[in-house]
Structure formats: structure tokens, C-alpha cells
Amino acid sequence: MKQILVVDDEKNMREVLRILLEDNGYSVITATNGNEALNKLKSGLIVDMIISDLKMDGIDGIGILKYLRQIESGLPLVLITAYGSIEAAVEAMKMGAYDFITKPFNKDVLLTIIRRIFRMESLESETELLKKIIRKGPLIYKSSVMDTVMHTIKKIAHVPTPVLLTGESGTGKGLIAETVHHLHEAQSGTSLPFIAINCPAIPENLLESELFGYRKGAFTGADGNFPGKVRLADSGTLFLDEIADFPLTVQAKLLYLLEEKRFTPLGSSTSIKINTRVICATNRDLKKMVAQGTFRKDLYYRINTITLDIPPLRARIEDIMPLAEFFLEKYSHELGKKITALSDAAQNAVKAYSWPGNVRELRNVIERAVVLSNSSEIQLFDLPMELHGSSISEGRSISRFDLMERKLILDALDRSKGNITTAAKILGVSRGKLRHRMEKYSL
């Protein structure tokens, strides 16, 4: 059972979240403020996610986020924020927060965010999704830069040489690795294992045993034999995501595995021969890490025999709408909704946005929009407010007051799910005045 730490200085909010999460199968620990939350974490509390209020006295949500970054934890953090703090929440996401919800929050949106982070989709649906993507190209793209990437993938799929995937977070390096693997499967005509490890998500003291396995009695708590992910991937592919987070002690053993195709489990004196292909991925500058002494030079040159740099979404804008339409179809089907398109205004906003979070951000935005939408089309107000800047008429000077008023209107429309009468009541204005203001801001 996944365990979630809820941090909020409002007792009612803590209780509402506790009941909601427990009713949906999660174990919940609560903390009344950031100080208490950090004390629990420092004392050894193990949780799978943190949901925290953004604004609290003392250590707030940002303080918790900074602590997680300081200890280089991959623990996901979701922030709860009031409308007036949305800009701060967006900045927090740029710092590494996974997502945010606004008060009063929609329980379906929150649960969808949690399920997405925990990747609670079944293995079968993930496999079917991947097969669908492979049949379509194998990747969804129209751009020439991705055509070049795909051409290289087809050339290297059948060879066992290590591959290094570089690029910003969210560009789809994991999907690229799976595509390489499945093309190899198709060429060999055999079903082969694909094992993925998110390196930052595994504590340093457990990474070696997770990778190479152990024998019973190798250490305290080793009550049986564990084959390790390397052996589970034998004859197939081992994908090491965020290889830059590998500790130096384990880097040496990985190099030996790549050079000799052998490894020795913890607590054993016998090495095991395997035939595992290794694909690594990183969003960091490994050359710089080599110069700093935090990444082995010999390992770097071994894993980058073939390097594929995956371009960010802003460098392949032709791919934005095909991807958006794919995610729209996927989540409409999964959530049982009949949403067939994005409105013209929503399309313009999606195409004009810079997508700093790349394909992952686009997927999350479309998923959220499908959850919120009550019509057959995704409307502009179904999209997060950071996408709305491009929809204001060009050539007109926009004052700070205009921006704030526009955000208030969009928030009211969001809360009312597009009902103008309800939105007008929320804002305390007449329906006619709201329509006039909406026309002013091209909403």
C-alpha cells in the first residue's frame, strides 16, 4: 500500500485529505506543518509521496521542496495552493515539484495526479499503449529532427552496444529506450525482458543489491536470495534512467558488467555470465561531472559508444499537436469521456507555449484538461493558466492589472467548469459584464 504524507496547518484540510486518500486505498500520515514533516522524514519515516500546503508558518511547501532537493531525494511532492499563490506554485514546479492543486480542489483531479505519479496503470495497458505507439511510427512525430532520431534507432536496435540517451527531463528518453528494445524484439522474433531502474528513486545503500542481487545472509534483512535487475534483464535490455545519480562505488561494478558481461551478487563468490544490453539516460552534463570527479571517465566512454540526443519539444513544434491529440484520445478513453478535439483557442495556446517540461508536461496538461472538461472539446479555460498568455490579442499593451483580472476570470471559469453564470456569481459581477471582460481578453 502506498503511503502519503499530508502536510497542512489547517485541521479540516488534513482530515478531508486523509479521508479521501484512505477511501481510495492509500495509507496516510499527517503533519501540522513543515517542521513536523521534516522531523518525521529525518527520523526515518518512509513515504511514497508528500502532499503539502504551499503557504504555512515556519517551513512551508517550498521549504520541504528545498530539503528534498538538498538531500537529492526523488520523493514526489504535490503542492496545495490558494489562487493568489498560483504563480509561486508554478515556480515550485520549475524547482522540481511534481504538480499543484488549487483550493477548493477537485478530488478527481487530485486522485488523477496521484495515480499518474504512482503509475498505477496496469502493465497490460502500458504494453498496449507502447504497441500502439510503435504501430504508428514507432514514435508519434512529424518533425525532421525526430525523423533523424528514429532513423538512428532503427540502425542500432539489433546491436548489443551500450546506448546513452541525453536530453532535458520529460523529452521521452524512457520511451525511446523501450522503442529500441521493442524494435530489437521485432527483429529477433522473440519476446525479451525490459527492466527499467529509476536511479534517483533507489537509496544509494540499496542500489547495488537492487542491481546485482544478493544471497541469503549477505546483510541484515537478506532473508532469501534475490536475482537482481541485471539478471532479470538477461538477454534483454536494462534501462538505467538518470545514470548521473549512480554513486562512484557502484559505477565501478557497472563498468565491469559492461566490459566483461559478468557480475557477482552480494554475498556470493561466484560471478554470473549474462547477455544484457544496457541503455543509460541522463539530463545532466556527464562531461562536466567527469571533470569534477563525480563520474568515472572510463565508464563515461563505455556508455556513450552510441549517443542519442533527444530534442526538447520546443525544438520540434510540428510534434506538439499530434502528441496532444494522442494524449486526448488516450485519456478520454480511459476516463470514459467523449472529448474529440481541442478548441481553436486551446490549440493556439498549446502551440504557442514553450513547454519547459517537454512531452511529460504536455501529457499532464492534456490529462488534467480531460478531467476538468464537461464538453466535447477542450476549451482554453480547461488548460493551466500559464498557457493562456499567448491567447491575448497581439499588439495590445497588457498592464499588470489586466493580467491579474484575466487570471481571476480564468480561475472563476475553471472553478465553474465553463459556466458563465456561475463564474459571474463567483466574481460578484453581472453575466453581461463578465462576457464583456471575456471579450476584452479574447477568452
Image (tube, grey):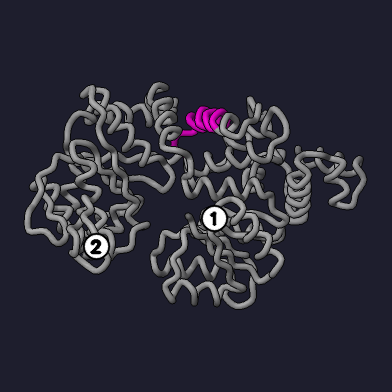
Q: Residue at x 48, y 44 (%)?
A: 120
Q: Chief secondary structure of the magenta span?
A: helix
Q: Which mark is residue 26?
A: 1
The question of residue 324 being in magenta is answered with yes
Residue 139: percent from the left, percent from the top?
40, 28
**Kind of residue at badge 2:** Ala
Could you say which is closer to the camera, residue 405 or residue 93?
93
Could you say which is closer to the camera, residue 28 or residue 180?
28
The question of residue 148 being in magenta is answered with no
- Split into 4 quadrants, where in the image is the C terminus? top right
Relative to residue 196, is residue 386 drawn left or right?
right
Query: Circle 2: is it few (<14), some (14-19), or many (20+) Cα within 10 Å?
Result: some
Is residue 200 placed above or below 152 in the rendered structure?
below
Q: Residue at x 71, y 57 (%)?
A: 103
Q: To which quarter of the image does residue 366 belong? A: top right
**Kind of residue at badge 1:** Tyr
Pointer 2 or 1: first along the chain: 1
Residue 39: percent from the left, percent from the top?
49, 77
Could you say which is closer to the camera, residue 27 or residue 99?
27
Tell me if I can see residue 394 in this picture.
Answer: no
Relative to residue 287, is residue 259 drawn left or right?
left
Q: Kindly state the secondary structure of the residue where label 2 is placed.
A: loop
Q: To which quarter of the image does residue 137 belong? A: top left
What's the magenta region?
Answer: 314-330
Residue wearing tag 2: 222
Q: To which quarter of the image does residue 336 belong? A: top right
Q: Residue at x 77, y 55 (%)?
A: 401
Query: Circle 1: is it few (<14), some (14-19), or many (20+) Cα within 10 Å?
Result: some
